[in-house]
Amino acid sequence: MNNSQSNSSTSNDKRGTMKSHLSQLTQFLFLPVTFAYLEVVFHLYMKMNLKYIPIYLLFGLSIGFLCSFVTSLFHKKINKYLTYLFCLIGCLIYCIEMECKMILQTYYQLLSSAETAANNNLLDYKDAIITGITDHLWGLLLFLVPFVLLLVLSHTVFSYQRRKLAYSGSLLGLSILFHVGALGVLNLSWSGDIEFLPKTLYASDKNVEDQVESLGVLTMLRLDIKHSLFGVNNNISLDEDFSSVNDLLNAPMTASPAPTSAGTGTTPSPLSTDSTPEPTKAVDTSPNVMDIDFSDLASKESDTSIKWLDKYFNSVEPTNKNKYTGMFKDYNVIFLSAEGFSGYMIDEKLTPTLYKLTHEGFVFNNFYTPLHFTSTSGGEFQNLVGLYPKNGNPISMTYTGKNKTWLPFTLANQLNKLGYDSQGYHCNVNMYGRDLSHPNLGYDWHQSGSGVTMEKNSNGKALWPQSDEYLFKQTVDEYIKKDEPFNVYYMTISGHLPYSFGGDQMAAKNKDKVANLSCSEKTKAYIAANLELENGLTYLIDALKKAGKLENTVICMTADHIPYSDVDILEELSGKSFNGDQLENLNEKNVNFDVYKNSLILWSGSMKETVEINKPCSQIDILPTLSNLLGLEYDSRLLMGTDILSDSTPFIHFSSNCWMTDKGLYNRFDGTFTLNDEVEMSEDEKEAYVTAMKKVASYKLKASELILTTNYYNTIPALKK
């Protein structure tokens, strides 16, 4: 062989070796780069904060190198299939999480969400899913880019050969190194509320949205598996100085809010009435409490969580009875959670019954229905239980049913002791485990397949959604003709998404009634669908009147949640801008919180005068308010809301941990506290007030969760089942 041939052979060998090394490098960097790419693109597409990019980049690289390690261990064909599998699953995870967030307002957790997903009827969301795919097609394509690249490059660049142990070991080492690096970065001194710092979220099974934003999608899923299998540390401290919070809240301020008329909802005034005569007899203003010595219970308790609850409730100031206490004593009760309802749609001519019920009786000018975890079930939980739902799995309402958690203060459980007949109805199949949870609330529960018939079309197929009027008509005689007092609960459904005349049979049914409205087709469809609720309420009131029971029945209704995926409807109806594109992802960073402003119906045919309330309030306050109006014996310290008609301090909590009081609005994202008009505080007073209220919010959320996990009410002798 001559020198030129030798040099050519050597050159070819070098090129071959270089090509081989490049192939190896490309192959083993592909999955780490893929997961890093997916995390960054996901955060950009979902408009999340990028300040935590070092954390989820490092976690993404760690998972990628771990996958690369696995794809280096086996025969060429197996390594190839594993690479395809890891890449495809990774891309699909981000596609699915985006769709879940866009449609259901929450991310899907691998283990803790599985049972809920299996039990829910996804066909109810068929049109919404199709719309979600078409509306976010570019996002889906972006998340599939790595898999497309793999298909293109696979046969020309990657070799998939089994590698030497030392080489594979280096990939595992890199995975560990990046993981440790991520742990180090998340433990740095990040700014923000302690509950939402990366290191806190890493140890938590709550606040999934914040976990995704700070830690990344894959880390959220990994933590869900870990916490589902091994549990989570509640970090209960018995050294909490609860009294210091009350001291801060009761400290004198520079100025208090002056009485004002109802405005945007952020400048509330105290309770005001419209020509309601003062009672002639002395009013009992004693606290609404039961004979419970929390201090004594705490001294005898060994369980840390229960002891913490005893100490906390011992510090809570009860609300007082007032001139409305017992106003509806011995009345019948009809309570409705209205699916996807917003008071912005109420019109005096188009919805006269809704207009009458919201403008007579008790009128709440600053009532809010904030979104919480799982929307419908979370809204029902606040309405019926008076506690905050956990911001994560397991779903609070579902949990109470499966575990038969004792809930003595639900209206049904309170009224059943007094001889009431408590019935509950929902015109749909079993969702969120209501077949277990609602009987546990005290209701004789009826849904499709167990006492409720679903309306069908000429082909024998159930309509979607079902008609509220149809539900009321088939059920009202079951309780209205009985001699004993009744307590009835309806979970309505006509207002369920999607809002279109093609995919919503209730909207299509009432299309002619909204044809002349000057608004978009989607808004028309939303109003048309809710006309079934209007029709149902009209029928219900007529039935009560004919039965001679309108005067001794109280009707209460509010939404389970607003139409959260269609904020543009609310903007059109209200004439306001709510930054709806932000709320689509339940992003409350820049949202106008008036998007949650809603109507609360609290009305009886016996009321001759209107009582107007400008105090801010929310769903969590309904149960204690009704308990007081019905003259029931309950302990106001043991519920997270307060009687709206009392002199209690108002508190509204939003899912992002922003909150509102009669003093102002706290934005936890930038740490600002915006004072209401006519409220003055020095900077020191503001700081002390915000510090105290942040602890109040934390205590309420923690107490709500621990009440369920410890079955706390059943540990109190006076409340035992």
Image (spheres, grey):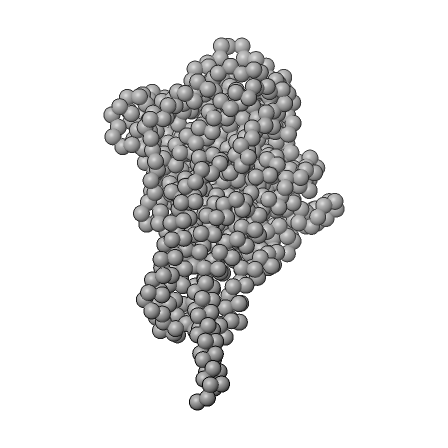
Residue plotted at (60% across, 24% down) = 676
Residue for point 51% across, 38% down: 656
Of residue 498 and residue 180, the one placed in the foreground of this image is 180
334, above or below 217, in the image: above
Q: 442 or 405: which is nearer to us?
A: 405
User: Residue at image x 36%, y 26%?
Assistant: 240
Looking at the image, residue 317 sits to the left or right of residue 351; the answer is left
Q: Is residue 28 visible?
A: yes
Task: Locate residue 365: give its quadrant.
Answer: top right
Between 217 and 346, which is closer to the camera in this rendering?
217
Front residue (pair 30, 713): 30
Q: Where's the N terminus, which quadrant?
A: bottom left
Q: Farthest bottom residue?
A: 1
Q: Against 474, is 649 above or below? A: above
Which quarter of the rendering shows the C terminus? top left
Left or right, residue 113 beside residue 371? left
Q: Position of residue 397 (x, y in %)?
A: 42, 41
Quadrant housing residue 83: bottom left
Image: 209 above or below 551: below
Q: Residue at x 47, y 67 (%)?
A: 26
Q: Position of residue 609 (x, y in %)?
A: 61, 21
Q: How many marks?
A: 0
